[in-house]
Image (spheres, rainbow, N blue to C red):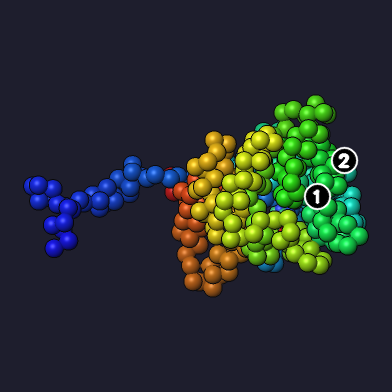
Amino acid sequence: MIADLGRRTETGAFTRTRRTRRTAALRGLVRETRLDPASFIYPLFVTHGSDVRQPISSMPGQYRLSLDQLGAEARELRSLGVRAVLLFGIPSSKDPEGTEGYSPDGIVQQAVRVLKDADPDLAVICDICLCEYTDHGHCGLLSPTGEVLNDDSLPLLAQMAVTCAEAGADMVAPSDMMDGRIGAIREALDERGLTETALMAYSAKYASAFYGPFREAADSAPQFGDRLGYQMDPPNAREALREVEADEAEQADIVMVKPALAYLDIIRQVRDRTDLPVAAYNVSGEYSMLKAAIANGWLDEERVILETLTSIRRAGADILITYHAKEAARWLASND
Ligand code: PBG
């Protein structure tokens, strides 16, 4: 009998793990992982125009917002206890160099000012990448033969970081995956006296199919080829640790793993290797996948979303970047 092979004590008692599962109060006492809206970052898509609240069809419940909508958004986030946003911009026009991305009056730089005006206590983070602003949709400058140029792209990314920081951003988050960008951006910020602007590095960002809906939202799909030449290859784990090590050496303040769900093992390994805060990006495809199943009545919305976010925390993420931030905060408040 299995029970005789070590599960019984000398007096014959079983190991009874069910004792602490019996009631909600007991489960609450022994719970190892908790969700807290204070650790959520809510991504926002900002666009030109006025009175724009344009639904993103592949991401039900998410919108492209014009600047005049941001004050209300900031108030809602505050009431829910979500204290940080990550901004993505949709420019009025695109060109090969992604000019609007680093213009002091670009849409994201304007959005920073509006949000900081509405709520100075809100942590405003800018995604730093050229793909939303280039007409070819790649994350950096291209060579005449269509290769993404690493070193030539760095000054533009640094310029984007500086203009966002000067507009009042608390943090910049480079997502382009050029080598050396964290160091280049830190140096450019420091040279301008922006020594307090924090850097959240998309350190282990994989070339993932889960970004599909985001590319519709941000209109940032590459016009040719793919991002495999600069984003990470999904089969690699040790390489993620090298990325983290490099970003740490270049003075990243927070490191990130992205996407989250197919990469929970990477989150855990990064958590075990660094003392920096670890963020995980629960990306668009992960959001849309659940929303589609929920819309079909196949999954229970609140339970499946909270379970998913909990799994990312349990894997080791301190910070969750998620489109579910608002609804999850609402459920967490009503469950108290
Ligand atoms: C920009 C960027 C992307 C995402 C965040 N920043 C898209 C990409 O790399 O193609 C994806 C976010 C998501 O899917 O939710 N480089």
Quarter of the image for residue 166 reads top right
Q: Nearer the viewer, residue 29 or 24?
A: 29
Q: Which residue is mark 2?
A: 104
Asked if residue 241 shows in the view, the reply is: yes
Task: Please tell me whether mark 1 sits on a helix, a strand or a loop.
Answer: helix
Q: Which quadrant is the N terminus positioned in?
A: bottom left
Up/down of 128 relative to 169, above or below: below
Up/down of 135 relative to 115, above or below: below
Residue 334 in picture, x, y percent from top left: 47, 48
Between discs 2 and 1, the one toward the N terminus: 2
In the rendered view, does 320 fall on the left or right side of 20?
right
Q: Which quadrant is the C terminus positioned in?
A: top left
In the rendered image, the residue lying farthest to the bottom is 296
Q: Residue at x 66, y 41 (%)?
A: 246
Asked if residue 118 shows in the view, the reply is: no
Q: Nearer the viewer, residue 332 or 322?
A: 322
Q: Residue at x 53, y 49 (%)?
A: 267
Q: Residue at x 39, y 44 (%)?
A: 32
Amino acid tagged 1: Asn
Q: Residues within 10 Å of mark 2 (few under 14, many from 20)?
A: some
Q: Quadrant of ligand 1?
A: bottom right
Q: Which residue is mark 1?
A: 150
Check if mark 2's residue and mark 1's residue have beta carbons within 8 Å. no
Up/down of 92 relative to 201, above or below: below
